[in-house]
Amino acid sequence: MGEGGGSVPIPRVVHLDDYTEAIGHAEVDELRVLAGRLAGRTVKMVNSTSVGGGVAEILNRMVPLLQELGVPTRWDVITGGNDFFEITKAFHNALHGAPYEPRPELLELFLAVNEMNRERMEFSEDFIVIHDPQPVALARQRQLQGSERRQGWVWRCHIDLSHPNQVVWSFLEPWVNRYDAAIFSSPRFSRQLPMPQYLFYPAIDPISEKNRELEPAYIQSVLDRFGIDARRPIATQISRFDRLKDPMGVLQAYRMVKKYTDCQLVLAGGGAADDPEGGQVLAEVREAAGNDPDVHLLELPPWSALEINALQRASTILVQKSLREGFGLTVAEALWKKKPVVAGAVGGIPTQVIHKHTGMLVHSVEGCAYQIRYLLSNPAAAARLGENGREHVRQNFLITSNMKRYLVLFLLLSQHP
């Protein structure tokens, strides 16, 4: 079936040339030249989940494109039980500054799961990129294989390490120190480390199902399915049901706005395989929302990219009221769609939302409500933010820019003795 009449658009096989319209011929040609200089060097990417979250989304698109460029790339995902991912979720919160005193047996379990994964994986590639803390101890492989083969090991940290819990960071830091390079999403996230550190912005794919243009009929069909009224203003936050995303704060801001301006609220997202808290947070928000017919809580499965795209395009305002944030790719997604954004001034969000130029930054529930009311009352200002936001994303936050940075880093690592 085609895209008309509300039917689901058919996914397309994507090739590098498909990005020419978004970035131009010169940028596409530059990627090919850089990849050619790597002469078939191989890459392994490792993270903790293949579905849910920005890291999985980036890898799902970038790995096939690297392969098309002649850079053979393998993507592996570590395995572990709920107890392991409860530990890593606690680590995640602690690295964002939350208090946490892990018992010694929990640290031992973390290392044991990493060792189990290390033993089942092969590490024959030229460049190994380990994403985030969950698989950081895979770097033990370097110690075991010694200097028999020169490899480049890179730790890619997607979270905000500006004020980490010192107990957790002191445990992880010796493992991080085993890498040849570290990548962070903001200069403020970097730490005092013995290896070179690099700034890589996370990125969105402009032609993926989540970001490409959609037919109006399909957008309307999604709104109809979820009972959302297209004729009335819609404020939407797309994110995991995670306390650090502050869905309760968004709900409170909506209620403040609702006293003065008719609107609807959509809180839509799902869980990730490495996040065991999502169901509990969703239940708390559902209870707080009560029976308000204008609050739509949507728990979406991982394959809902088209629905998320439609919800973002149908929304009047997109919100990302995070309390802590590594980067927040949902912000870049919203800006790419020319939507006005109201977002928390935390983590990597201010890199995307330049206050009063590409969106509005807020520091409180009251501030969030104020900016939503302002944008609902000033559609011309909202449209201007949207135009500026799309161009800002085009210049800085597309997946092709991310690939270019990786290719340059691999070239640098290959030149080291």
Image (cartoon, rainbow, N blue to C red):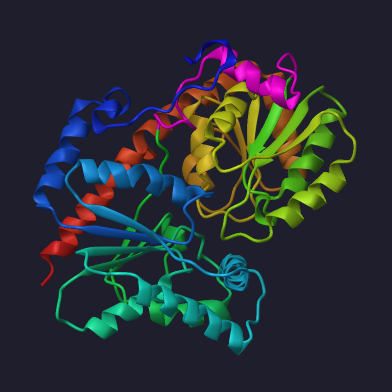
Q: Which residues are magenta?
A: 206-232
Residue located at (54% from left, 32% from top): 334
Q: Quadrant of residue 18?
A: top left
Q: Tell me where residue 290 appears, x and y as whole percent.
A: 89, 40
Query: Looking at this rendering, what residue extends furthest in the right direction?
Result: 291
Q: Is residue 54 above or below residue 134?
A: above
Q: Is residue 69 left or right of residue 238?
A: left
Residue 64 visible: yes
Q: Quadrant of residue 95?
A: bottom right
**Is residue 313 or residue 339 the one in the foreground?**
313
Q: Residue 229 magenta-drawn?
A: yes
Residue located at (67% from left, 74% from top): 99
Q: Tell me where residue 186 appears, x and y as whole percent.
A: 43, 55
**Is residue 307 or residue 155 the one in the foreground?**
307
Q: Is residue 375 above or below residue 366?
A: above
Q: Is residue 255 above or below residue 285?
A: above
Q: Is residue 84 left or right of residue 32?
A: right
Q: Tell me where residue 36 appears, x and y as whole percent.
A: 10, 45
Q: Tell me where residue 345 appears, x and y as whole percent.
A: 59, 48
Q: Is residue 12 above or below residue 117?
A: above
**Is residue 237 or residue 351 the one in the foreground?**
237
Residue 357 visible: no
